[in-house]
Image (tube, grey):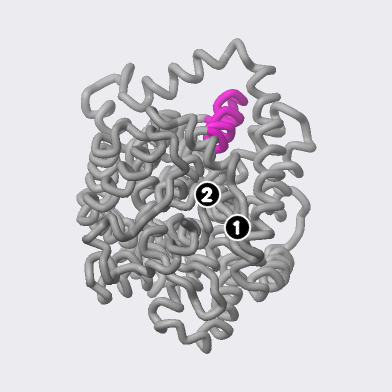
Amino acid sequence: MDYLMSIADYIINLGNDIVWTYVIIPLLLGAGVFFTYRLGFVQFTHFGHMFSVLKNSRRHEKGDISSFQALSTSLAARVGTGNLAGVAVAITLGGPGAIFWMWLIAVIGMATSFAESTLAQVYKERDHEGKFRGGPAYYIQKGLGLRWLGVLFAVFLIFAFGLFFNAVQSNTIAASFEHAFNIPKWVSGVFVIAAAGIIIFGGLRAIARFAELVVPFMALAYLVVAVFVLVTNITVVPQVLATIVTSALGIGQATGGVAGYAISAAMMNGIRRGLFSNEGGMGSAPNAAATATPYPPHPASQGYVQMLGVFIDTLVICTATATIILLSGEFKPHMETTGIALTQMALVSQVGAWGDDFIAIILFFFAFTSIVANYSYAETNILFIAKGNTKVIIPFRIAVLGVTMLGSLATLQTIWNAADLSMALMATINIIAILLMYKIIAKVAKDYNTQRRQGLLPTFDPSKFHELKGKIDTDIWAQKK
């Protein structure tokens, strides 16, 4: 068994080295810069509008999912172990400079998130229960006419979100509870799958309602503690910020070779963990974006809302974790402690013993909400593959819960590596797809902002877009006029 695991680890690591080094990083950075320019630096010029759209979020019909609920669902998936354990892993493996690259990938990823989420709204459809579903698999099939590529994306997403990422979440919950409360990992695993099963079997609307209630509470509680740490160490903050930047750029390293290695390690780990956390361009958040009944009733409005999700996840919550770790002074180069244990240790040094329990509890909420939101993404894609046949749902739910249980007992590094590879493969397909459809993205965004400048409530009229004729469900938008 150990021999087979070592072979699997070798294959996974080789795949990660190839895909991340030569494919995904150039694509991510290139697409982010391209959409930032093509959309008029939307994440900067329309920064305030993101909050305006979210403020006006509302349901139009009983049972519809609002933009706020869709954002909460996507944040439930985004805000998980990546924000607590993932940041610690990035700092341990890449140094403080990894945080700089997390920031950079988030800033340019906001434009990519706008693009993919707008597309998800354009090509969404109603399922047999009247709920909206959509995402990359759907817009690849409808927009590019490539069902086989949509199916391939769906397969990678199912492995990534339905299996590997949920195993990562349950693994981290079990580890933190064992560290804080001496609870055996199998006990935590049983509790997690029992609680997740109740919500998952409630369906898409139950997941949205759960996320709407829990996500704002958990994020605010964590940020309050992070702000306390920041304020009590305010005199050290400039030094920490300088360390992040100089470490990212290799400034102060002894030789060119050492500096180059430091920059490479910081960049690679920062971008990997940043993408895992904020998901901008990965093709996951569009699955949540498509479920919303947006207000204003226009696809671009959900693009703005989901763009805000990237900002909250990385530039707010991940930065909070980095602040706690780096201000504590607990991080040391080449230290063995990593992941959630480092975050817990850092907070304990700042607030006392209760910080250990606090991180364990807040992590449970972060990771648990990710599990149920990740499942919703996977369900949408399993239905896409099955062409709407709902007979696959119950067996799939059982399989997801089973893997989640196994994840609580597994080796962390193997799971992280498998998650990295599946994430990179689905992101590669998604980024290529949205780049091929950039013209419709730009045209939809221009239509929205033209109406805004005219003092109108932006409303989507499919008849103005000849390239969409016969490719989308026009009745969806006709009802919103």
> In the displayed structure, does residue 444 sit left or right of residue 167?
left
For the N terminus, the quadrant is: bottom left
How far apart are labels 1 and 2 at the CA level? Answer: 9 Å
Q: Quadrant of residue 340?
A: top right
Numbered mark located on residue 295 in the image: 2
- Residue 312 colored magenta? no
Q: Residue at x 55, y 46 (%)?
A: 85
Tell me, yes or no, if residue 280 can be seen here. yes
**In this picture, which residue range is highlighted in magenta?**
316-331
> In the displayed structure, does residue 320 sit left or right of residue 14?
right
Majority secondary structure of the magenta segment?
helix
**Above or below, 245 relative to 144:** above
**Above or below, 247 relative to 27:** above
Query: Is the residue marked by circle 2 packed among few (<14), some (14-19), or many (20+) residues within 10 Å?
Result: many
Q: Which residue type carries mark 1?
A: His
| Residue 379 pos. (x, y %) | 50, 73
SS for dot 1: loop
> In the displayed structure, does residue 140 sit left or right of residue 370?
left
Q: Quadrant of residue 222?
A: top right
For the residues labelled 1 and 2, say whether their Cβ atoms are less than 8 Å apart: yes
